Image (tube, rainbow, N blue to C red):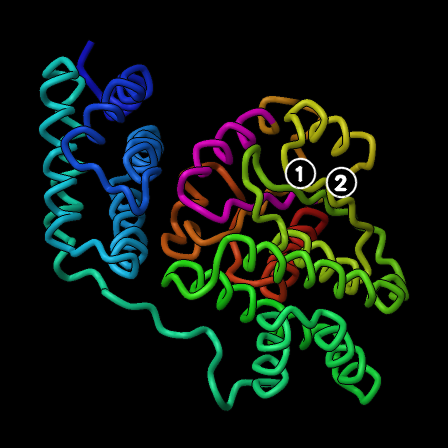
Amino acid sequence: MNPTPQTADAAIRDHHAVLTAALRQRVPHAAVPSTSSDHLAYLAQALALDNPALFTDYVAWAKVMLGQRGIATADFAAELHHLADLIAEQLPADTGTAAVAFVRAAIAALPALPDELPTFLHPGEPLSPLAHQYLEALRRGERHLASRLVLDAVATGAAIRDIYLHVFAPTQHEIGRLWQINKISVAQEHYCTAATQLIMSQLYTHLFSADKKGVTLVATCVSGDLHELGVRMVADFFEMDGWNTFYLGANTPHADIISTIIARRADVLAVSATIAHHVADVDAMIRAVRADPECAHVKILVGGSPFNRDPDLSRRLGADGTAADAQRAIELANTLVHAGTA
């Protein structure tokens, strides 16, 4: 059998512990001890999907994250060279070739990848002053003030859709950026996210007042993806548009997702993966849904950072489409459902 990226993926997974230990011995990054394992996990995902761009995208993210923690790009490049060498040493030549090629491609791209990330909060955007005030309140640990800012804005006429699109979404992206550039801790990131989830729930009396259209959405994120706020926002947008929504959160088994689709007669399944590491899990979920004849009518939308960077990825996984934000997800879903009933 000829070697493929998929067989290299299996080999990487089988040798994960050995390769991780060997890489940590050669390049002991005490400041970020988890990166050796992360390199291999993301590489395996990219190989599973035969998509070297996914690994290069991870390397771009890691370059910024490591650089902000005192690890120079030259040192990161050296680590990747060590990774390629170890794969060549530890894996059989035929299965290791594809993995080494993916790593070498990322190394070649590394010098041109950005060293910094621009802010997600831009002056002149709708509700920009509110978004800045909201973020600063969260960073100070003042969630009650953050809540009051949002509730006052709604009381004075701000549309909840605009609050979601122009306050919650960009501030969540900005919080992720601030962690990546080492300006806030994991604890602060989690606090800000939990506070936004709480404040979103305070708006639910407005969400559930829309007239129903007789269409149903099931929304979830893949196993292990703890960044579920984005798909929850998508579900809320569908609710505001008159859809019946069933938000399942994260880590729901495929069999339970399928049974919910069938029991609720869902028209659309929305699946989120916030990082490339989870794309293969999206692939597995789509395959499971497509394999059940009772789900043959269901349209599948996928979203998250990997799909924003590579819009064609959704098609290759067998989804019906992807959308960069909640509003575009609704527009696409309505088009797909309408086309299916025309």
Q: Which quadrant would residue 141 be assigned to in this image? A: bottom right
Q: Amino acid at mark 2?
A: Ala
Secondary structure found at label 1? loop
Mark 2 — residue?
266
Which secondary structure dominates the residues rendered in magenta? helix
In this rendering, the answer to whether 70 lies above or below 28 is below
Q: Position of residue 108 (x, y in %)?
A: 10, 49
Q: Quadrant of the image for the N terminus?
A: top left
Secondary structure found at label 2? loop
- Of the numbered discs in the image, which one, if any, rests on residue 263? none
Q: What residue is at 60 percent from the left and 73 percent from the top?
A: 140
Q: Residues within 10 Å of mark 1 (few under 14, many from 20)?
A: many
Tell me, yes or no, whether the highlighted magenta stretch contains residue 271.
yes
Q: What residue is at 48 percent from the left and 88 percent from the top?
A: 123
The answer to whether the residues at label 2 and label 1 have Cβ atoms under 8 Å apart is: yes
Q: What residue is at 57 percent from the left and 43 percent from the top?
A: 226
Upstream in sequence: badge 2 or badge 1:
2
Tell me, yes or no, whether the highlighted magenta stretch contains residue 91.
no
Q: Which residues are magenta?
A: 268-288
- Of the numbered discs in the image, which one, if any, rests on residue 298? 1
Q: What residue is at 15 percent from the left and 62 percent from the top?
A: 112
Q: Nearer the viewer, residue 68 or 101?
A: 68
Q: How many marks?
A: 2
Q: Position of residue 237 (x, y in %)?
A: 71, 62
Distance in Å between CA atoms under marks 2 and 1: 7 Å
Q: Position of residue 263 (x, y in %)?
A: 82, 31
Q: Amino acid at mark 1?
A: Val
